[in-house]
């Protein structure tokens, strides 16, 4: 299959969530342009990183793809109001060191695959892809935490399918026509589509529980797992640096998630300085009134011991009236 045909392979994937989450007619009337931009960013991020394999090496792609982490942290800082501590920056550096160990193992094993026809263009495509992925992931985190996962999947599926299908017809129609369809190719494309569907369906759940930055730190291990599969499928040569890389990335990932990122307070405050919660105010007033009632009852008992029943009855009645006034 031609390397640049990412649009053709992702078109069925983008359509799948739409079929499951199609009752979003109201959202289309007000936010359609926002989700078009989101779908465009996600589709082109996928397309650019695969296209880069035609121009640069695997080592460059693995290293430059980590550019998504600092971009994500910057965007999260400004738009999601995420605040990171020193330990989070240290954890990110540990994860990137693990990626460096993985790249070093590839170089030692002679697995610096890919093309060198236009390294500058290929590296630029990887950086562009990482930036677009960061934008898409920040939008995803905002949507799943403030709106709903169904809305995100439905809109990304709808507009991703349209954009990917149009791009397929314009850029790759000749390559699609030249494919010699066999059951192996159909099986591979189907497997790829199912894997992408599972990834995009489960990722919003993890993003909602953690953050887009944490999810992308965990995804740094994806290349390692593909290498481990290659040891059995393609007889790759093994290096101890792969284990070192995996352990290093996992340590950084666990460290990043062990300390929660400080978030701005979500308590709403009214203009007069009180809590915007009428139930809490009524409850406090009720407690004050209840305390006044008890005080008055005690006072009535004390007076009843030293005076006649008529006077004590008058005192209790007066206290009850005062307590009701306080409420």
Image (tube, rainbow, N blue to C red):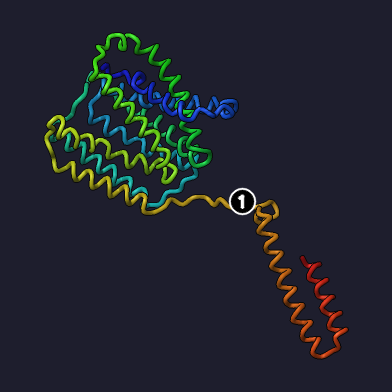
Please tell me how crowded label 1 is: few (under 14), some (14-19), or many (20+) other residues with Cα within 10 Å. few
Residue 119 seen in the current view: no
- Placement of 287 over or under 68, stated as above or below: below
The residue lying at 30 percent from left, 18 percent from top is 4
Residue 293: tell me if it is visible.
Answer: yes
Q: Position of residue 311 (x, y in %)?
A: 87, 84
Task: Tell me: residue 96, above or below residue 273.
Answer: above
- The answer to which of 194 and 269 lies nearer the viewer is 194
Which residue does the image show at 42% across and 38% down from the upper left? 204
296 or 66: which is nearer to us?
296
In this view, 76 is above or below 5 = below
| Residue at the image point whose x is 39% and y is 24% from the top | 44
| Left or right of residue 30, residue 237 in this image | left
Residue underneath mark 1: 268
List x then y, in percent, for residue 103: 21, 36
Q: Is residue 59 left or right of residue 36?
A: left
Q: Quadrant of residue 24?
A: top right
């Amino acid at each position: 299959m031609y390397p640049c045909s990412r649009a053709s392979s992702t078109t069925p994937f983008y359509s799948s969530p739409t079929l499951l989450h199609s009752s979003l007619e109201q959202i289309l009337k007000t936010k359609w342009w926002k989700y078009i931009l989101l779908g465009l960013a996600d589709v082109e991020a996928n397309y650019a990183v695969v296209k880069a394999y035609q121009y640069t090496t695997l080592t460059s792609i693995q290293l430059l793809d980590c550019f998504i982490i600092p971009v994500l942290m910057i965007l999260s800082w400004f738009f999601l109001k995420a605040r990171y501590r020193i330990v989070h920056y240290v954890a990110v550096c540990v994860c990137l060191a693990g990626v460096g160990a993985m790249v070093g193992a590839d170089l030692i094993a002679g697995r610096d695959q890919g093309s060198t026809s236009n390294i500058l263009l290929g590296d630029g495509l990887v950086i562009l892809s990482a930036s677009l992925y960061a934008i898409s992931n920040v939008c995803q985190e905002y949507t799943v935490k403030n709106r709903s996962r169904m809305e995100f999947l439905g809109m990304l599926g709808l507009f991703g399918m349209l954009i990917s299908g149009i791009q397929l017809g314009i850029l790759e129609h000749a390559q699609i026509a030249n494919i010699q369809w066999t059951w192996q190719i159909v099986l591979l494309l189907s497997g790829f589509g199912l894997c992408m569907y599972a990834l995009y369906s489960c990722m919003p759940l993890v993003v909602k529980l953690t953050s887009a930055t944490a999810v992308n730190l965990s995804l740094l291990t994806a290349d390692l797992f593909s290498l481990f599969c290659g040891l059995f499928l393609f007889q790759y040569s093994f290096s101890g640096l792969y284990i070192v890389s995996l352990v290093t990335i996992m340590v950084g990932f666990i460290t990043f998630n062990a300390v929660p990122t400080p978030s701005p307070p979500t308590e709403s405050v009214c203009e007069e300085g009180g809590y915007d919660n009428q139930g809490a105010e009524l409850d406090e007033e009720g407690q004050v009134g209840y305390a006044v009632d008890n005080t008055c009852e005690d006072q009535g008992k004390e007076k009843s011991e030293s005076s006649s029943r008529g006077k004590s009855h008058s005192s209790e009645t007066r206290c009850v009236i005062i307590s009701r006034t306080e409420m």
